[in-house]
Image (cartoon, rainbow, N blue to C red):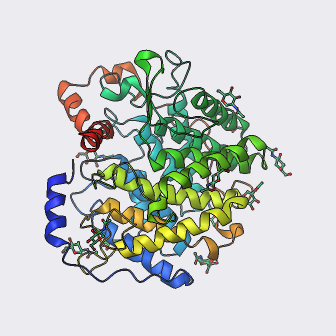
Amino acid sequence: MKDGLAWRRVLSVLLLIQGVRAIDLDLTSEDSIKNAASNAAYGMMIHYHGNETGHIPGKLPNTWWEGGAMFMTLIQYYHYTNDSTYNEEVISGMQWQAGDCDYMPSNYSSYIGNDDQMFWGLAAMTAAELNFPNSDDGYSWLALAQGVFNTQVARWDTSTCDGGMRWQIWTYEAGYTMKNTISNAGLFQLSARLARYTYNESYYEWAEKIWDWAASSPLLSNSTWNVADSTETTNDCATQGDDQWTYNYGAFLGGAAYMYNYTNGTTKWLDAVEGLLNVTLEKFFPAKHGGEIMSEILCEPTEVCNDNEIIFKGLLSGWLMLTAYLVPSTYDTILPKLQGSAKGAAGSCSGYSNDTCGVRWWNSSWDGWIGLEEQMSATSIFFANMLPFLDSSTAAPVTSTTGGNSTSDPSAGTTDTTDDDTTTSAITTGDKVGAAFLTSGLIGAWVVMIAWMLFF
Ligand SMILES: *[C@@H]1O[C@H](CO)[C@@H](O)[C@H](O)[C@H]1NC(C)=O
Ligand SMILES: *[C@@H]1O[C@H](CO)[C@@H](O)[C@H](O)[C@H]1NC(C)=O
Ligand SMILES: *[C@@H]1O[C@H](CO)[C@@H](O)[C@H](O)[C@H]1NC(C)=O
Ligand SMILES: *[C@@H]1O[C@H](CO)[C@@H](O)[C@H](O)[C@H]1NC(C)=O
Ligand SMILES: *[C@@H]1O[C@H](CO)[C@@H](O)[C@H](O)[C@H]1NC(C)=O
Ligand SMILES: *[C@@H]1O[C@H](CO)[C@@H](O)[C@H](O)[C@H]1NC(C)=O
Ligand SMILES: *[C@@H]1O[C@H](CO)[C@@H](O)[C@H](O)[C@H]1NC(C)=O
Ligand SMILES: *[C@@H]1O[C@H](CO)[C@@H](O)[C@H](O)[C@H]1NC(C)=O
Ligand SMILES: *[C@@H]1O[C@H](CO)[C@@H](O)[C@H](O)[C@H]1NC(C)=O
Ligand SMILES: *[C@@H]1O[C@H](CO)[C@@H](O)[C@H](O)[C@H]1NC(C)=O
Ligand SMILES: *[C@@H]1O[C@H](CO)[C@@H](O)[C@H](O)[C@H]1NC(C)=O
């Protein structure tokens, strides 16, 4: 684990006295928004050393999945600001970690979970949709997204719960017995986006299959629109781990927005978008903070968010912006929430007199926290406020017939043997112990710990 809680608490006590200069944000000015995003992105990238001698492109210390989320953020950042400062690093990191065109790089594949791999796939999909510059000699962005899709649907598990993606890929991982929302909602969203970009109906059919399965499981309710975090295969998905996280809602919401757009506005997907959006806004924009500032409600009140969780608000920010483009009737509802959150985040970015951003956005002051993850979420909420300045004809995600030209490879990733038993049988005990600590399986441990802190 990168930064211990105790360490952060000491910091917050010692350093709250410092830091009064906040990011000056004028939401009516394009330049002001770009400037805020630029500050936040700069503060994120001072934590990234992957392009320096002796470091590995795309690999962050103690975490692999966060690299995918970081590059996804930077791809959007470039698209919505035109600042190409970090493009070379994005391209080299995204290609270095690509494995055999499927984001299962052999250094880490023994502990990668479905959700970890999926985030890199979504980053590649984002690059294709936003016409991010191609790599001269690497895989196409679309092929990378297809590679992740192909390797993941091959793991669709009907041996329990009549379907669904397990959280972990390998039997020796603690989360193997779980089916969790982010793995399923993430693949649902990736499939929906591939359908819209390529117009290949197979991707749509998969997306709908994943959605319908989730709606029949404890993960997603299509009547109350509750999104749980996980369910257990050991009792055939009878029980629900009901922790409430922004990114779980956002992953389903974003995917439903693509389905709506791809199907030219069918009722099934409009209902899903409206239902999920309504609950998301009610829940994660608490009335007690004025109702317009996003909050990670499970971990912010007691300030116990771990690095993974600090990124979730940034992910939801990006997906809300996409939803406003893809389902134009949601624009008026979404914009004030993005604006209120950006104002709050700007107030929070007042640490160390150098615009360091904290975790909580609702107290208009810095909360003493510092990290790549805090900067990542702030970057996202700032660029998302370019929404009113950019017409959907230039800013919305493109498809293969509306300006996207990323090269398709429908069989990408299918020659990779990483998933074969022969490879896995060679894994040593050392790998297993490492895996338990290194994967995003940490989330599980944290859920338990947070529950403990909240209730005892
Ligand atoms: C801001 O100051 C802190 C404390 O000195 C430092 O750790 C951090 O790297 C600085 N951030 C930027 C963007 O310079
Ligand atoms: C890494 O990227 C940063 C930011 O773009 C740049 O300033 C630095 O020169 C790069 N380092 C190398 C070794 O390419
Ligand atoms: C980026 O630059 C292009 C070309 O000058 C312009 O059309 C586009 O609107 C700009 N985008 C942003 C986000 O400023
Ligand atoms: C795998 O590890 C080796 C040795 O540390 C390193 O040189 C290489 O860049 C790593 N590859 C990836 C994809 O991280
Ligand atoms: C459509 O996607 C499916 C599923 O990946 C693939 O098998 C098929 O070859 C694709 N069709 C075309 C025309 O690309
Ligand atoms: C809602 O989910 C239930 C349970 O899976 C399903 O039977 C029903 O058809 C779904 N309704 C819609 C509108 O998709
Ligand atoms: C959406 O509308 C376009 C243009 O009218 C049409 O070509 C396409 O087939 C429609 N897509 C679906 C999934 O109905
Ligand atoms: C959600 O829907 C309810 C019932 O229609 C409505 O009263 C409420 O204002 C909606 N909340 C948001 C945030 O849109
Ligand atoms: C799909 O998204 C595009 C791009 O934002 C938008 O112009 C179009 O109106 C959307 N389609 C529907 C059916 O809302
Ligand atoms: C808001 O931040 C200030 C310090 O700037 C602190 O005194 C106050 O307790 C915080 N409020 C809450 C609700 O955390
Ligand atoms: C896609 O179009 C851009 C220009 O818009 C061009 O630079 C790029 O080479 C094209 N990519 C492919 C794969 O054709």
Tell me the quarter of the image containing the C terminus. Answer: top left
**Image position of 69 (left or right of 388):** left
Quarter location, residue 388: bottom right
- Asked if 440 appears above or below 206 in the picture, the reply is below
Could you tell me which residue is drawn at 53 percent across and 75 percent down?
82
Q: Quadrant of residue 9?
A: bottom left
Q: Can I make out residue 256 in this image?
A: yes
Residue appearing at x 41%, y 70% in the figure: 345
Residue 51, position as x, y percentages in the image: 30, 62
Residue at image coords 51%, 84%: 31
Q: Is residue 123 above or below residue 24?
A: above
Residue 133, placed above or below residue 415:
below
> At 36% across and 69% down in the image, what residue appears?
363
- Judged from the image, the quadrant occupied by ligand 3 is bottom right
Confirm whether residue 140 shows in the render.
Answer: no
Total numbered badges shown on the rendered structure: 0
What percent of the width, then of the height, locates residue 316? Answer: 50, 55
Between 38 and 22, the one nearer to me in the picture: 22
* Image position of 130 (left or right of 259): left
